[in-house]
Image: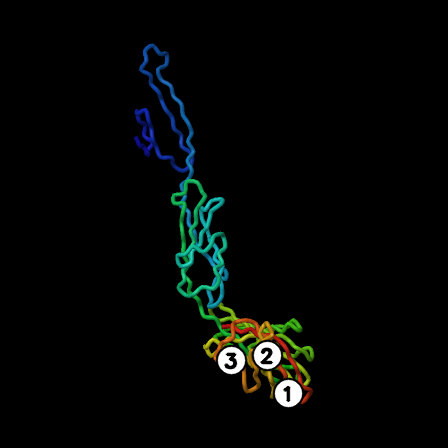
Amino acid sequence: MGNPSGVATSDSTYDFVVGNGIDSVSVLLTSSLPCLINPTSNDYDVVQGLISLMPSVSIITNPSVACEGSPLNFIPQQHYGGVNPTFEWFVNGQSSGSGTVFSPGVLSNNDSVSVEMTSSVPCAIQPQVSSSFLINNFPRPIADFTYSNPAEGAFLNQLSFLNTSIDASSWIWYFPADSDTSFVRNPVHEFPGQGSYEVTLVVVNSYGCIDSVTYNVLVQEAIAVFVPRAFSPNGDNINELFQPMGASLTEYEFTIFNRWGQEIFIGNEKKPWNGNVKDSTVPAPEGVYVYHLEAKDLDLDDRTINGRVTLIR
């Protein structure tokens, strides 16, 4: 009979529940045969019980903040999973992968990511356990800036930058040409000399979400021009047009080509590219395009600039 209390019994069969740690079980036999010198005999055995464990699993993300348009890595945090637990991942209830790191890409608000762990620990009370994570994306800031000469007649290698970012609480500027950085909102930077330079602005908002923008700045004797490296004509009225800019850039013409060298668009200082094919309403596909810029009627000789721009929908 079941006897979890460990009380002695005269039955020939003795059942008990093994506890945590070590238990000792002994038996005393009294014989009914006649003429025995010692009618009793005893023996014992040691029973070692394994601890019954309840596995659990939770989910952490890297990065720790979910931001619009940014992918997340999901990592399970297991307790009592054993030496070799297995993990199966689900997105909105659909099986989507396995392993100790899950990278589903960009997710939308209210998407649900869950993990089911199968524990390999012995004596698990419930070998399969699960946890879920509901996506709540925080808005990202929008990084952007313009520039100009700091004063009339100033040395043209020195440019003044205006931070026009939206919803940014902190920022850092990168000037790779001379490995310089700046934490000033609107810095003034002197470049090493004439040439084309990259300038990157990284901004962070109060949620910890990050955005960045990089422009090519062309510094020459009497002309300083920068050409956006990307734009997004998606109807949100932010960064909708592609157009070269510069303090002394007055008249120019530019041509856009796709990766096969086909002409996509011809524009000028009065006609920026809105992301459509030529003058139609057909949107050009998302991707990288080549621009050919011819700046005319400047104080010095005409300039030709070639580069690439990324169209993002």
Q: Earlier in the sequence, mark 3 or mark 1?
A: 3
- Crowd rating for badge 1 (residues with CA inside 10 Å; few <14, some 14–19, many 20+): some
Vertical order, 310 against 119 (above or below):
below
What mark, if any, has residue 296 been given in the picture? 1
**Residue 38 at what x, y percent from top left?**
37, 14
Judged by depth in the image, the label closer to the viewer, 2 or 1, is 1
**Residue 134 at what x, y percent from top left?**
40, 61
The residue shown at (64%, 87%) is 296
Type of amino acid under label 3: Asn
The residue shown at (44%, 52%) is 88
- The residue tagged 3 is 274
What mark, if any, has residue 227 been given in the picture? 2
- Crowd rating for badge 2 (residues with CA inside 10 Å; few <14, some 14–19, many 20+): many
Residue nearer the viewer, 310 or 143: 310
Type of amino acid under label 2: Val
Vertical order, 27 against 226 (above or below):
above
